[in-house]
Amino acid sequence: MNIILPPAYDNEPAHQQLKQLMEQKKNLSVRLDDTPCAWIGTSNMTRLRYLLNTASWKWITNYLETGSPDDFKVFPSIREALPDFQATELKALVDTKRRIYKIPFLRETQSHLNLVAVFCFGKIYFQISRTATIVEYLNAHNI
């Protein structure tokens, strides 16, 4: 029995595409998951998958704040384990007084909270599991 593994995801083309979008000063829509992975799109482009590490995440958030596409010392092929990525980054943005809004639903019985952080050059969308600790944290910060 032969087991054929799929090829590893090559993050370099996604990095080059993302940098090109940044150089064109596009308004980015970044949807996060806990892989950690970002699904990045624009108003006229479907989302591309971009695997994150600490340096690449800082690069993306810096672009969203300042519009600078400089990717010095960002190596997209490096893989890092970033446990509980979305909740950690959401708390970091809340602590820096970033504008974050809860996306309301008609029913509050959903298993996830949907939030959006607004920047000058785009938005970051979070979908975080609804737990008592995260709900208390958000309520304490009036979100």
Image (spheres, rainbow, N blue to C red):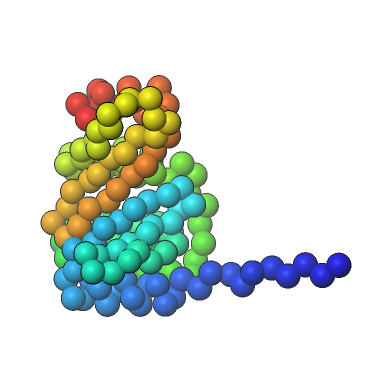
Q: Is 123 in front, or is 44?
A: 44
Task: Reply above or below: 14 against 123.
Answer: below
Residue furthest to the right in view is 1
48 displayed left or right of 29: right
Compared with 118, 72 (above or below) is below
- Residue at 53% across / 69% down in the picture? 9
Q: Position of residue 97 (x, y in %)?
A: 18, 39
Figure label count: 0
Residue 118 visible in the snapshot? yes
Residue appearing at x 19%, y 68% in the figure = 26
At 50% from the left edge and 73% from the top edge, which residue is drawn? 10
Q: 70 or 10, which is in the foreground?
A: 10
Q: Nearer the viewer, residue 88 or 103?
A: 103
Looking at the figure, which quarter contains the N terminus? bottom right
Q: Residue at x 35, y 64 (%)?
A: 47
Q: Position of residue 84 (x, y in %)?
A: 46, 41
User: From the viewer's perspective, is residue 67 above or below residue 106?
Assistant: below
Task: Give the x, y percent position of residue 75.
Answer: 42, 70
The image shows residue 30 at horizontal and vertical percentages of 30, 56
Q: Is residue 133 visible?
A: no
Given residues 62 and 15, the one toward you in this image is 15
Residue at the farthest left position: 120
Please say if 13 is above or below 133.
Answer: below
Placement of the C terminus among the 4 image quadrants: top left
Is 8 left or right of 23, judged from the image as shown? right
Q: Quarter of the image holding residue 56? A: bottom left
